[in-house]
Amino acid sequence: MGRRLVMLGLLGLLPLLAVPALASAPEPLTPARRVVLYEAYELAAALQPWDRVAGISTYAKENDLLQRLWPNLAGLATPGSGFVVNVEALLALQTDLVVTWSRKPEALEFLRRQGIQVLAIYPESIADLVQVLGQLGQVLDRQDRAALVAATMQQHLAAVARYRQERLAGEPAPRVVWLWGKPTTINGNRGVTADLIRIAGGRNLGEHLPDLNRDISMEEMVALDPEVVLIWGSAVYTPETLYTDPKWQSISAVKNRRLVKLPRQSTWSPRVVDLAWLMLQTFYPGAVSPAEVAAQLDAYYRAVFGIPWPGWSP
């Protein structure tokens, strides 16, 4: 009998859709003994839940952080992903909780009808990430660890904001856009990325857009005239794509070669602290000590992940 697959979404649409944050199970969450992580596996890894996880997303097997952290990652079952769930493989694991995203309510309801508890998430802010950490701590029976990780993450993000406020107070905030899968899809005033731009002292040129992201015209982009362009790490294009595109030549970030492709890592992760420091360095080149940033991140990684900071991910 062929395997049944439930389609939960399309990878290419991930950054383009605005969906409700933190849609969760209607019943209170209870500790689970056999958990499948389709999403939030970097957040979960910081809680060291090795004895509670029965399966993990196919994509997690390729995750550079999990490859360093997770014992026997290669041996974990992979019953699909948050995009495509292999129902038979999932049911065979006899899981009592699935962590996934809230894109497809009908798929979530199907899982619940199988008697599986569902934690469905879509964090749209740093505050949401902290809330998800608390929920993961609850279902993985790691409440104390979750509280520690959340507090440490918030303390280090506050350190980035203090660095900007205290040491770079006289510097004007650069005009910034974050680009998603298309070079004309910019971040709006919602989302973890919008929070990170604010923390690092950038002026988000999508702040007037009440969306996670929105496609704009090239004429609008030229009128915005960003001084710094941040490119999503999983985008298929590079800074060189835009440096050589005639339509971009009048934009300040291109003239001054201030386009940066970010590391290919999740923003639903404690690694948002890496991104905040990288943004600060990008927004204020030469004004931030790389040695101090490395020391801060090394201390952070040791506290949250139990490993040294490996440097910027590719």
Image (tube, grey):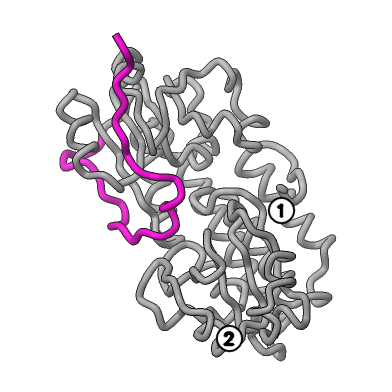
Q: Is residue 63 left or right of residue 35?
A: right
The secondary structure that dominates the magenta segment is loop
Q: Quadrant of residue 40?
A: top left
The residue labelled by disc 1 is 297
Q: Quadrant of residue 153?
A: bottom right
Q: Is residue 307 above or below residue 207?
A: above
- Pinpoint residue 171: horizontal percent, then vertical percent: 71, 88
The residue labelled by disc 2 is 222
Helix, strand or loop status at disc 1: helix
- Residue at (23%, 37%) from the top-left corner? 108
- Pinpoint residue 145: horizontal percent, then vertical percent: 49, 39
Q: State the quadrant of the N terminus.
A: top left
Q: Which mark is residue 183?
A: none
Query: Which residues fall within the magenta stretch?
Result: 1-29
Residue 3 colored in magenta in the image: yes
Q: CA distance from mark 1 to mark 2?
A: 36 Å
- Pinpoint residue 237: horizontal percent, then vertical percent: 64, 58
Q: Is residue 255 above or below residue 81?
A: below
- Pinpoint residue 272: horizontal percent, then vertical percent: 57, 56
- Residue at (60%, 50%) from the top-left corner? 271
